[in-house]
Amino acid sequence: MEWDALVRAYSTLLCEHDYSNAIQLLQESSAEAHNPYRYLLLLANLSGTGNKEQYQAVVRELEEETKKDDWGWQILAYYRGKVSRGTLWGQIKKNYNEQLPSFYFFVGLDFLSKKKPEEAKSYLEKCLETKYDLPWCKDLARIEMEKLKGK
């Protein structure tokens, strides 16, 4: 399944609050198996479920992954606590401006996983307001904002 189709299916499951099938969809996506964004979504969802065994299995899988020097792997390093948000911000401003929506979205998602909804909301709003267009990222940010409103 290509990334856009995977994100559409994943988004539908999120809207239906079907988190276990959303996680399963991400885990079984062989075409996107080495996509750092897939890993980010998996880790964010698994941290919310409290399933430490599954979370650690994904972390072990990541340890074996060949990492490239691109934005997806940079933000994954942040998410795993390997680089600070300030370092990540410096990298995006220097090399990856067009990826601003993903920066805001994944930092917002990180705050959600840490049960900090106000901080998350701030970053998700910035994701939606940025002039750069990453439709899949903005769609997922909208879904997360709707979930925040429903709480």
Image (cartoon, rainbow, N blue to C red):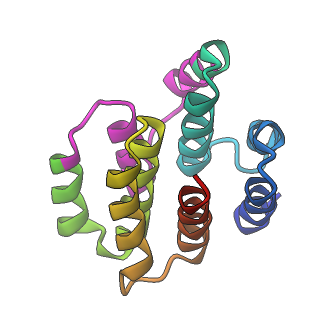
Residue sitting at the far front = 151
Residue found 59% across the figure and 45% down from its top: 41
Which of the 4 image quarters holds residue 149?
Answer: bottom right
Q: Position of residue 46 (x, y in %)?
A: 62, 30
Answer yes or no: is residue 63 visible: yes
**Residue, x 74% and y 43% (percent of image)?**
26
Of 96 and 53, the residue lying toward us: 53
Q: Against 110, is 91 above or below?
A: below
Extreme residue toward the bottom, this view? 131
Residue 49: % across, % down: 64, 28
Q: With respect to residue 109, does 77 lie above or below?
A: above
Q: Position of residue 132 (x, y in %)?
A: 40, 83
Q: Quadrant of the N terminus?
A: bottom right
**Residue 70 in view of the camera:** no
59 in magenta:
yes
Please say if 146 is above or below 33. Answer: below
Q: Which residues are magenta?
A: 56-85
Along the horizontal axis of the image, is 108 left or right of 97?
Answer: right
What is the residue that sits farthest to the top in this orientation?
53
Indicate yes or no whether the magenta region holds residue 66. Answer: yes
The mark total stands at 0
Q: Residue at horizontal 43%, vertical 63%?
A: 102
Percent coordinates x, y for residue 99 in the rendering: 38, 69
Between residues 42 and 95, which one lies in front from this camera angle?
Answer: 42
Whether residue 127 sits left or right of residue 56 in the image: it is left
Magenta region, main secondary structure: helix
| Residue 146 placement: quadrant | bottom right
